[in-house]
Image (cartoon, coloured by chain):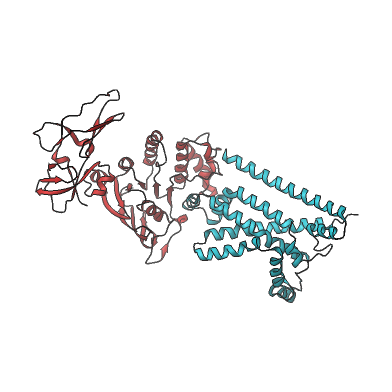
Chain colours: A red, B cyan
Amino acid sequence: MSDKLLKVNIQKELKEFDLDVKFELKNKRLGILGPSGCGKSMTLKSIAGIVNPDEGIISLTTNEEITYFDSDNKINIKPQKRNVGYLFQNYALFPNMTVEENIAIGLSKDDSEKSVSDMIKRFHLEGLEKRYPRQLSGGQQQRVALARILAYSPDVILLDEPFSAMDTFLKEQLRIELSNMLKGFDGFSIMVTHDRDEAFQFCDELIVLDQGKIIAKGDTYDIFENPGRVEVARLTGCKNISKIEIIDDYHLKSLDWGVTFEVSKKISPNITHIGIRAHDFIAAEKEDVNVVDTENATKFEMPFEWEVTLSNGLWWKYDKEIYEHDFEIPKYLKVDPKNIILLEE
Amino acid sequence: MMDWSPIFISMKTASLSIFITFFVGLIVAWGIVKTKNDTVKIILDGIFTLPLVLPPTVVGFFLLYTFGVRGPIGHFFIEFFAIKIAFSWPATVIAAVVMSFPLMYRSARGAYEQVDSNLLDAGRTLGMSEWKIFWKILFANALPGIISGGILAFARGLGEFGATAMLAGNIAGQTRTLPMAVYSEVAAGNMGEAFNYVIVIVVISFIVIFIMDYVSIRKEKQWKY
């Protein structure tokens, strides 16, 4: 894996904005996180060759470097020749073919028989060979779609919001299944999603995309801990974000909540916002640091947490047991200075 | 004694013309769906649909103008192959193909557009050739719509009258198809003879529709339910 490299550098003019994405991938699993319509799917489709970028280079190095697309040298390899597997949001199984036929469709006659039976076993599809996609459950469909892609032994697998159209229960189950199945895959996988949990769970590295531009790029844990920018903080699930006024090196005033906070890192002049994760508040005394008053707060009960909204708009989430139904909001809450995330616009 | 030749002529004409219309219609519809340029698309679509909206005699007029002895194509065939197209049996096929083509083409196009484009892209990323994608995915999944287009086109070809009269005429034993025969018998006051031909047309049409419907419903049931 160490010498494999996927290079993507593409520009494409779209209706709403211009897509401009550039990255190099050495790690196995990349996530592209962004709101819907930010150019995520377009990026995947460009890598697969279904859509052509206006300009740029896409190349993959395994044993040797293969250029998929190069606008300057007029290279554009057909999707058929790229060896890139694409898992569509609705799986795109061929409704007129059985499970077996779906898996065998991209294979040559000679190796189809053996690989199909291997795939049927590996993906636990025994007994379903003669069924049509409509007769399968969502989980079985996902397994067939993956089996169909892996039978073709691709160098790269692209996953286009694979769980977006599912109910919560199925989603959680299939996430685990997909994660396990991809463990045996020795190539790149790129997952596009707008769901921070999926991104966190699947990806070693993360790219955050907004309006066609990369606004954050790096190790998944780092991006969640230090989002750096307002939009990234929002996409990684930060509930409380406010514009600020800098008071001194370690103090600032939030303009949305009217509270003054102390922070642990020196505030540089380009900081315009702060973020506080809803779980980072704890009960406090009046004279503590970074205290907020909870007067007139409202609470909502969820199965495993209390969601409290303060009168100034701050959110607080507090874990609870399912059988607890009573909860008294503490008079004061505080947040540790090191848990205040400094953000740029 | 009833003259059986209109039945044979009609069967020959309708079979050959639906064969041509069906495949050409499929391919042309595919080409139009793949055309990216909207202006080209609209112009070509207009040309292919025109025979559906024009009066058949007007289409026949244009055909005669092209395939007639002095028309560009008719003249070419006489000059190089010594074949006269107008007022001969091939003319009945040409008239039937041109008149039934829009129905086949439009049905196929509509049916293609119903097929999820992700399926086609999935086929591409799985290494299927464009030709294989066309037959195994696009055609196979559009089949119910294509078949109903085929039925309509066949019926239109079998019943063709106006354009056939203009280009092929009404020559007994050569270009007198069933609809022509019905018209001729009625014009000659032989209502009984006309009635026989009418019955034959109704029976043939019904059988064809029945067979095609039966096939498409069975096929669809197999993978839909």
Question: In the picture provided, is A275 more to the left or to the right than A92?
Answer: left
Q: Position of residue B53 (x, y in %)?
A: 64, 61
Q: Position of residue B185 (x, y in %)?
A: 85, 58
Residue lying at 54% horizontally and 48% vertically, measured from the top left: A110
For residue A181, which quarter of the picture? Answer: top left
Residue lying at 15% horizontally and 43% vertically, measured from the top left: A258
Question: What is the residue that sits farthest to the right in this orientation?
Answer: B1
Question: In the picture provided, is A106 more to the left or to the right than A3?
Answer: right
Question: What is the residue that sits farthest to the top in this orientation?
Answer: A323
Question: In the picture provided, is B53 more to the left or to the right than B189?
Answer: left
Residue lying at 60% horizontally and 56% vertically, measured from the top left: B106
Q: Position of residue A22 (x, y in %)?
A: 31, 57
Above or below, B169 relative to A130: below
Above or below, A330 relative to B137: above
Above or below, A8 relative to A258: below
For residue B82, which quarter of the picture? Answer: bottom right
Residue A262 visible in this rendered orientation of the protein: no
Q: How many marks?
A: 0
Q: Quadrant of the N terminus of chain B?
A: bottom right
Residue B6 visible in this rendered orientation of the protein: yes
Closest to the observer, B182 or B224: B182
Q: Position of residue B69 (x, y in %)?
A: 74, 74
Closest to the observer, A256 or A29: A256
Q: Quadrant of the C terminus of chain B?
A: top right
